[in-house]
């Protein structure tokens, strides 16, 4: 009963293919949004993911790229990448992005998927302070979220909020960290970003959630960063979007 959890692929086909090849056996794919924006392969990523994902919520980049929102909330580099993405998207990709659900969605009892906060799809949860209300008021005891590109999360035990972070050795190899969920706690859990990690680790991030044993596995896997960077540069996207992939920042 394992679910593959992915988020913030951001049109990075090289990272996505590495994740799909490395992911252990699973019965479903839940995608927490931002399929496109920043990376060089928006159509390829949408076409690869749409038939695979059983649950998918929309991210702020998906909304802007498909014309649901304008670009006023984005910094200049993100906005430039979104203008490029809008010009690249073929009609079927744009429609698929427009049809993504607004989070939170509840694919299983007591479990929710959101892009940002379960209380507001565009809100970031970066700290215990920002986690407090979403933890207490989410429609589900376990909420998966993305948007920050930082693997980890928060737990609420009675009135006590703690942050959770996988403890990796770092380096270039594949690593897995397991978290056993306590049936009396509430959780906000972020699988990390497949295509543009920002937690100082360049490796692609994803997670596996076992619905029967209530265990979460956080994964990091190496992928062909150089190829993803070359394709961003060849596309004429801002240089910073290529450079940041190597440092995971
Ligand atoms: Zn994102």
Image (cartoon, helix red, strand yellow):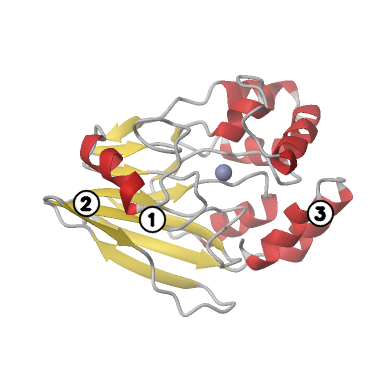
Name above or below for residue 226 compared with residue 96.
Answer: below
Q: Which residue is mark 3?
A: 239
Q: CA distance from mark 2 to mark 3?
A: 44 Å
Mark 2 or 1: in front is 1
Q: Is residue 192 rendered to the left or right of residue 202?
A: left
Q: Which residue is mark 2?
A: 212
Left or right of 167 in this view: 34: right
Q: Residue at x 77, y 37 (%)?
A: 80
Q: Position of residue 171 (x, y in %)?
A: 56, 79
Q: Secondary structure at mark 1?
A: strand
Secondary structure under tag 3 reads helix
Q: Local crowd at mark 2 within 10 Å, few (<14), some, or many (≥20)?
A: few
Residue extending farthest to the front is 129
The residue to which callout 1 is attached is 208
Separation of residues labelled 1 and 3 (CA atoms) = 32 Å
The number of numbered badges drawn on the structure is 3
Real-space Cα separation, disc 2 to disc 1, in angstroms: 12 Å
Q: In the drawing, what numbered circle is on residue 123?
A: none
Q: Residue at x 54, y 21 (%)?
A: 99
**Pointers 2 and 1 in contact (C-beta within 8 Å):** no
For label 1, the crowd category at 10 Å Cα-Cα, with few meaning under 14, some 14 to 19 and many 20 or more, is many
Mark 1 or mark 3: name the one nearer the start of the chain.
1
């Amino acid at each position: 009963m394992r679910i593959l959890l992915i988020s913030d692929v951001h049109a990075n086909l090289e990272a996505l293919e590495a994740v799909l090849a490395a992911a252990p056996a699973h019965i479903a794919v839940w995608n927490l949004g931002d399929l496109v924006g920043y990376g060089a392969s928006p159509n390829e990523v949408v076409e690869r993911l749409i038939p695979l994902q059983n649950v998918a919520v929309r991210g702020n980049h998906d909304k802007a790229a498909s014309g649901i929102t304008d670009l006023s909330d984005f910094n200049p580099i993100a906005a430039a990448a979104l203008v490029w993405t809008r010009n690249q998207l073929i009609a079927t990709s744009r429609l698929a992005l427009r049809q993504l659900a607004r989070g939170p969605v509840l694919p299983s009892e007591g479990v929710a998927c959101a892009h940002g906060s379960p209380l507001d799809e565009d809100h970031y949860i970066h700290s215990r302070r920002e986690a407090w209300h979403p933890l207490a008021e989410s429609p589900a005891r376990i909420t998966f979220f993305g948007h920050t590109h930082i693997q980890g999360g928060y737990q609420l035990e009675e009135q006590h909020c703690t942050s959770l972070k996988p403890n990796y050795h770092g380096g270039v190899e594949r690593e897995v960290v397991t978290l056993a969920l306590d049936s009396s706690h509430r959780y906000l859990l972020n699988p990390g970003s497949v295509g543009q990690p920002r937690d100082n680790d360049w490796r692609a991030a994803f997670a596996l959630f076992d619905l029967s044993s209530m265990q979460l596995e956080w994964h990091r896997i190496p992928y062909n960063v150089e190829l993803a960077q070359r394709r961003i540069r060849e596309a004429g996207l801002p240089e910073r979007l290529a450079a940041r992939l190597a440092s995971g920042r």
